[in-house]
Image: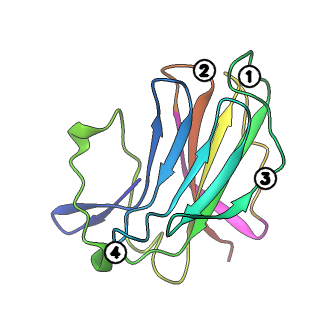
Amino acid sequence: MVIRDLADLRLTLWVKRSRKGEFFIMLPRGDREWDVHTSYHLDGTLHMKSHGSKVFTSDRRQPLNGTFRGSEHLGTYFGYGPKSVGAICDPMAFAGVVEVSPDVWGPMDGWVAVDLVEPGTEPTMKIPNSRIITRKQFTDLPPWVVITVGMPAG
């Protein structure tokens, strides 16, 4: 996920599928000690970490070592200040990017959601009072990764 800032693309978050088949959502921050990320493990454990500590752990979700069915929501992220992070994105380092303008996702409005879905399935998570600006599916391997970007309705 990147935001266009004049000639630069600012990295806002990225999703990585490990060789084992686990998923990680990384959020760049100016302070490397912060290390904000979400992970979804083979056994179905989903947790979010910050400063090396778990800040959220969900009930066990469907494991990633069998047939994936339906949809699993991995998180929704609100607000972003791209210049304060300073991470410049090289699109060639990623399998694909979702680009939005800074008026879509900034410090006070807009959101990005990350979901895993069975091929051909839509994410089940809905953000109330919002409209979808763009959605991109990454379909290289199941489960597919779906990135949805939205803003408050109105």
Residue that carries the numbered disc 3 in the rendered image: 58
> Closest to the observer: 31 or 93?
31
Q: Residue at x 78, y 53 (%)?
A: 58
Badge 1 vs badge 3, beta-carbon distance below 8 Å: no
Q: Is residue 45 left or right of residue 10?
A: right
Task: Please state the horizontal and vertical placement of residue 48, each as a whole percent of the image.
Answer: 62, 58
> The residue under label 2 is which amino acid type?
Pro
Sort mark 4 into few (<14), some (14-19) or many (20+) by Cα contacts within 10 Å.
few
Q: CA distance from mark 2 to mark 1?
A: 7 Å
User: Does the magenta portion include 129?
Assistant: yes
Horizontal side of residue 117 vs 86, given as left or right: right
- Closer to the eye: label 1 or 3: 3
Task: Answer left or right for 119 relative to 28.
Answer: right
Q: Are marks 1 and 4 in contact (CB under 8 Å)?
A: no
**Distance in Å between CA atoms under marks 3 and 2:** 22 Å
Q: Which residues are magenta?
A: 128-137
Q: Position of residue 12 (x, y in %)?
A: 39, 61
Amino acid carrying mark 4 in the image? Asp
Q: Number of numbered discs present? A: 4
Residue bearing the label numbered 4: 31
Q: In front: mark 1 or mark 4?
A: 4
- Local SS, label 3: loop
Mark 1, residue position: 68
The quarter of the displayed image where residue 75 is located: bottom right
Q: Position of residue 22 (x, y in %)?
A: 56, 32
Q: Determine the secondary structure under disc 1.
A: loop
148 on left or right of 57 = left
Residue 145 screen position, x and y as percent? 57, 35
The residue under label 2 is 142
Q: Please report whichever mark, 1 or 3, sits nearer to the chain's N-terminal start.
A: 3
Query: Residue drawn 49% across and 64% down?
Result: 36
Mark 2 closeness class: few <14, some 14–19, many ≥20 residues within 10 Å: some
